[in-house]
Image (cartoon, helix red, strand yellow):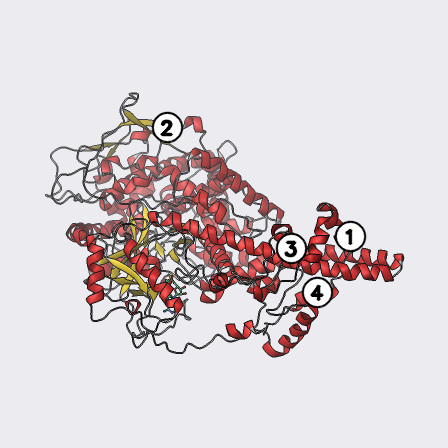
Amino acid sequence: MSRFDRDADSRASYPDDFRLRSPAQQPYTTLYFNPPTAYTCPPAAIPPPSSILAANGPPSHLAGCGPKTFTPRSGTPVSSKFPTSDMLQIAREISPPPLRRSQARTEPQTLTASNTGPSTVLQRHDTPIQTTQLATPPSRSSRASTVQKHWNEADLASALQDLLRGVRQDHSRLVTQAIEATAPIEWRVQHGANLFEGLGNGPVPHRKGETMRIKFKQHLKARKDAREEHHEIIAIKTMKDRVPRYRFHHVDIKKNVLTANTMLTFVPHLRDLDSSEESKYNLWLKELEEIDTKSGFKPMNREEKVILTIQTERAATVSLYLDTWLDKLGIPNCTKSALVAYMASQDLDDNIAPQKKTDIIRSSRETTDGDPTSLESRKAAALFTNAFKRAFDNNDMALASKIELRRILLLEESVDGVLDPKPVAKDAAPIPQGDVDEITEAHLATYSILGCLICYSHSCDHGEYDNKNLKRTFSLAAVMPLADLLRQRRRRLITEDADTRENELPKKLVLGQSQLDGVGYGLFTAEDLAQDDFVIEYVGELITHDEGVRREARRGDVFDEDSNISYVFTLLENEGIWVDAAIYGNLSRYINHASEHDRTGSNITPRILYVNGEYRIKFTALRDIRAGEELFFNYGENFPNLTKKLLDTKTGEKPAVPRKPGRPPQSAANKGVARKAPKLEQKKLERKKPTAKRRRRRTVANGGEDEEEDMQAPYISPLNRPVKRKRGLAKLDSDDDSYHMRGATTRRQWQESIAEDEDDLGEEGTPNGGVRTRRSLRARASQTPTKVDKSKVAGRRGGARPGSGRPRKHPRPVPKATPETAQAARRLRESPQNPPWLDSSNESPRTTRQRRAAQDASDEIQDSDDWSTGGEDAPPRAHRRDSQEGEEEEDEDEEEAVGESEEEEEDQDEEKAMEKGTRKEAQAKEEEEKEEEEDEEEEEEDDQDVVVRKRLDRATRNRRPPAKFRGDDF
Ligand SMILES: C[S@@+](CC[C@H](N)C(=O)[O-])C[C@H]1O[C@@H](n2cnc3c(N)ncnc32)[C@H](O)[C@@H]1O
């Protein structure tokens, strides 16, 4: 299931603010398995825990063995003879323990499940459940004696349906239990007024203008059937800053998807869609389906996917009960192994390869259940299979309600092991002893298909990220043995949270020229930081991995690809969610990389937190940091090239930085040392012949004026014009007619120099300053520049790296300096360790420019006060980017104009040839040309693919690795 479907799914069932509600408000009734009405299952359907304990011994986790004995995938014990999964164990254990004195309540409490109708009443977990479950269970043999020995298909089907109702009831109790187990037992408010007091009332009758309507979306239900409730509106007034929103405006993304054959135009995620967006979203899904179809796949539509997911989840749940069911039904010779063997032998549609079928049957024989392939076993298995089909997989049922026995049996470990062999529990790390946090983490690491502790789904957005940034869903195994541990921990965290909240204010930070040579800006602290202090939040646009790759590729192409500057941060590695701070961001984007082994080493570290339903990144200090120190964090292993050393002195003396191989120095380039022209381009160039047709076409299109203009247009050397973007790879692979070396002024010279360059430069060089032909001499016909605009040339490497380009066209509005920032600046000036940007002696003009920009910026730094979004920063940045891109377009026109003039040269040649040659020859040539043109167009398309692929590759290489996470926050 795709992330989006999953989101859609979870949106359907689990409101965003799920975690913030009190237990009484928890929407457990929206969970998938909850029954719509009160349960009618006989109490005997749920065997009491003690019977299981008597029969099988204690579940391993209760016996202190921890989850080591469970496989992470199926939850089935590996070593013990314990026949059921831990989920089933928990299901059996949900009968509450005897009340402890402290928990005892004088009056039994009830919870009303609001969406199951007012009549459904669920008992709190800490109130004894008034059923026979608490009675001493019948022994296994006595239970077996009560079951029917001779089944017919119809009776068996109806017994199975009863058992399924029991599963639902179990599930409902589990949810209650789990919610209670994880609910905070103390409110966050430790002192002062509890702002949430009085909240949590149920729905009220609708009063126009006074109540708030809440609509519940449910997939597979028509919109008109959506449930609605009305609630009182209670305003909470507080002087505290609200936690800032961290929303991604995915509509904006549309204009940011820039590469030529991009498929995604709309990427919604992580939030509910507005109704206007929903239609776009559906359209987008449809487009994706069409693309799949065109590519030869048979895509499922969204509804089918939802149904498949539901079916799979139901099958997974029933699989956990299958053993108990068989035990209860007591069908002679009907064991799980027999069912598996029967399933494998009956799999007629060749879903399983013949060899695998044999392996499955063989592995089922290895159990101690007797011979699963005997005639009796086969008969019993056939009876059960047919009854199961009748009960849960018949034609009268809605698709989503069907449960296939085959799907359940495929989940069996023996079958799964044959079909998809992979390492299991023995690889699990040993459970650490001692530290509460570590034990908790380790228990939670028993992630399995058992599902989420909160919603019991297998594909939800709840869960934790461990220190490797891998998502773990809570294991059900964690519920019972760990409930106390979790409580303990939560209590501690809540207390700590309240204590540290005051220290969680963002710090005064200033932007400056980094101490790393040639790296551009860096971020410095203007006040002393204590270890573990919160420093700043990393904010930016929330984008998908694909979009991030596109953007990186695009930036590398448009701006300076050699600098590899990157502002993306991998927020959720597995989900492919990145934060891009390039356009919308705050000061945190200027923090440079240092590894632990560098001279200063990283002094801060990012942590990913789950805040009010959103994942956010905060930086904390790794050690005490003095005011004036530059901040660094470790970007991770994917950035091996970030090896700039700290400057030894502050005098502006720069250590020699080795030049990149294959890249000629700027001066050499200006002298006309071109890089190698790509073979493809050269080939094209050689065979490209002028065509009369092309010439005529242009002349007609421009009322006959173009030709004259073209003739007059001087050939502009790429050297003599401002080039802001690097064509590099894009040009190497791309379509256009020709490349022009720097300094070459005629076509012949250029061709000659290409030949020389090929010898000189080898494979590394790529053409720069390439020229696109066609279109738009018109754009500059009247003002063909013949002079070099030096200021523009100077700014050509600008762009992605702030401050390194030309001065802003549209400077940011500079907020007034606050007393704090003024004081911070003074302190920094007075500091014996003045950061290098304050020392202006011996600096280059570029450094001066950077320094000035830094000073401007340091005045305007309010980001650290407004630690939320950097939103104020954003519009001017976006503007700046727009303006740059606008200029690039101008340049492109210029390039094209240059190309036009070249093409006109060709046309003149052609005209002469036409005059000389016979008409026939000319016609033949023209036809040849036409073919070539068509070929080129095709090539153009192919080339574009190559370009995009290359850019994507490059961007993938450059992407930032997962951030570090110390997972001790719930
Ligand atoms: C998030 S930006 C940091 C701010 C950046 N220095 C600027 O001026 O905008 C990350 C980029 O800075 C550069 N960078 C950061 N740390 C570096 C290091 N230790 N060595 C070389 N380049 C570094 C790389 O180009 C990287 O992609």
Which circle, 3 or 4, is nearer the viewer? 4
Which circle, 3 or 1, is nearer the viewer? 1
Q: Amino acid at mark 3?
A: Glu
**Residue 598 % position (x, y):** 32, 74
Rendered view: 613 above or below 113: below
Pointer 3: residues within 10 angstroms few (<14), some, or many (20+)? some
**Residue 3 % position (x, y):** 44, 47
Q: Earlier in the sequence, mark 4 or mark 1?
A: 4
Pointer 1: residues within 10 angstroms few (<14), some, or many (20+)? some
Rendered view: 222 above or below 906: above
* Alpha-carbon span between mark 3 and mark 1: 23 Å
* Alpha-carbon span between mark 4 and mark 2: 67 Å
Q: Earlier in the sequence, mark 3 or mark 4?
A: 4
Q: Which residue is mark 3?
A: 941
* Alpha-carbon span between mark 2 and mark 3: 50 Å
Q: Is mark 1 within 8 Å of ligand 1?
A: no
Give left or right: position of 940 versus 668: right
Mark 2 in CB contact with mark 3 (< 8 angstroms): no
Q: Which residue is mark 2?
A: 227
Residue 693 is tagged as 1
Kindly state the secondary structure of the residue where label 2 is placed: strand
Q: Earlier in the sequence, mark 1 or mark 2?
A: 2
Q: Earlier in the sequence, mark 2 or mark 3?
A: 2
Which circle, 4 or 1, is nearer the viewer? 1
Q: Amino acid at mark 4?
A: Leu
* Alpha-carbon span between mark 4 and mark 1: 18 Å
Q: Quadrant of residue 768?
A: bottom right
